[in-house]
Amino acid sequence: MERDGVWRTSTRSGGEGNCVEVAGFADAVGVRDSKDRQGPVLTFTESAWSDFVAAARGRQLDAHR
């Protein structure tokens, strides 16, 4: 699926290219692998993305819990 948008990489990502990029679309938020920009794009509703970001910021996704 081709989606136009401004793709952003986290400012916390390293220079090794092991990160994801995120773009906002009119109807969804897209996520793709920064090493495979022509590859698949995962899309999420704005609500689902907001919930994910809040959980990540609150460290609710910490695998060591």
Image: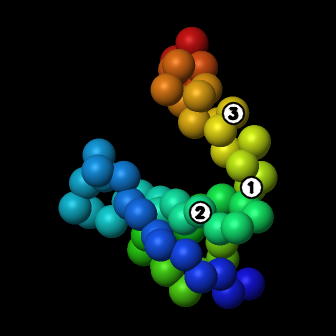
Residue located at (73% from left, 84% from top): 1
**Mark 3 sits on what residue?**
51
Identify residue type, mark 3.
Asp
> Quick one: SS at disc 3?
helix
Determine crowd level at label 1: few under 14, some 14-19, many 20+ residues with C-alpha closer than 10 A.
some
- Nearer the observer, disc 2 or disc 3? 2
Q: Is residue 10 above or below residue 41?
A: above
> Quick one: SS at disc 1?
strand
Residue that protrudes farthest toward the front in the picture: 26
Q: CA distance from mark 1 to mark 3?
A: 11 Å
**Mark 1 sits on what residue?**
44
Q: What is the quadrant of the C terminus in the image?
A: top right
Q: Are marks 1 and 3 in contact (CB under 8 Å)?
A: no
- Nearer the observer, disc 1 or disc 2? 2
Q: Position of residue 53 (x, y in %)?
A: 57, 36
Residue that protrudes farthest toward the top in the picture: 65
**Mark 2 sits on what residue?**
24
Q: Position of residue 57 (x, y in %)?
A: 49, 26
Q: Nearer the viewer, residue 51 or 27?
A: 27
Q: Position of residue 23 (x, y in %)?
A: 54, 65
Q: Is residue 23 above or below residue 52?
A: below
Residue 62, by quadrant, is top right
Residue located at (53% from left, 19% from top): 58
- Is 52 left or right of 21, judged from the image as shown? right
Identify residue type, mark 2.
Gly
Residue 54, by quadrant, is top right
Q: CA distance from mark 2 to mark 3?
A: 15 Å
Identify residue type, mark 1.
Phe
> Quick one: SS at disc 2?
strand
- Is 2 left or right of 53, judged from the image as shown? right
The mark that comes first in sequence, 2 or 3, is 2
Residue located at (49% from left, 78% from top): 36
